[in-house]
Image (cartoon, rainbow, N blue to C red):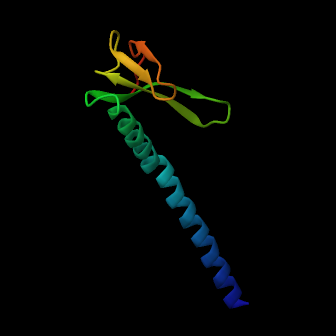
């Protein structure tokens, strides 16, 4: 019985450790990976383009979704920006929050 209790404790500790590592990855590493992917996509437009987060919204699932644009400059009014999803160009970044 003592051995079974010890194995159960190690299982619980292992599950908690895996959850902690997953939480840290999701909170700190995943946003950096996303930004890196979007920046690489923006470099296909030219070396002076950078990723700008223009909007964040919640779809009702409590998962915040960021909308990115590739902008020449900081995404302010008058800058040329391209949607990273559709390739459409717009004038002005409009509400950049990066």
Q: Locate residue 24, reporting x and y percent.
A: 47, 54
The residue at 29%/29% (across/down) is 46
Question: Measured along the vertical axis of the image, is residue 60 above or below residue 21?
Answer: above
Q: Decide if residue 75 is on the left or right side of residue 14.
A: left
Quadrant housing the C terminus: top left
Q: Locate residue 17, reporting x and y percent.
A: 54, 66
The residue at 50%/60% (across/down) is 21
Question: Measured along the vertical axis of the image, is residue 78 above or below residue 61?
Answer: above
The residue at 74%/90% (across/down) is 1
Q: Residue furthest left?
A: 48
The residue at 53%/57% (across/down) is 22
Q: Locate residue 50, reporting x and y percent.
A: 32, 29
Q: Decide if residue 91 is on the left or right side of residue 64.
A: left
Marks counted in the figure total 0
Quadrant in the picture for residue 42: top left
Foreground: 8 or 46? 46
């Amino acid at each position: 019985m003592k051995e079974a209790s010890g194995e159960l404790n190690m299982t619980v500790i292992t599950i908690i450790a895996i959850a902690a590592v997953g939480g840290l990855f999701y909170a700190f590493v995943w946003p950096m990976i996303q930004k890196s992917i979007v920046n690489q996509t923006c470099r296909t437009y030219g070396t002076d383009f950078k990723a700008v987060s223009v909007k964040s919204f919640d779809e009702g699932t409590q998962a915040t979704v960021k909308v990115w644009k590739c902008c020449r400059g900081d995404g302010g009014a008058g800058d040329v920006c391209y949607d990273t999803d559709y390739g459409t160009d717009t004038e002005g970044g409009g509400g950049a929050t990066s």
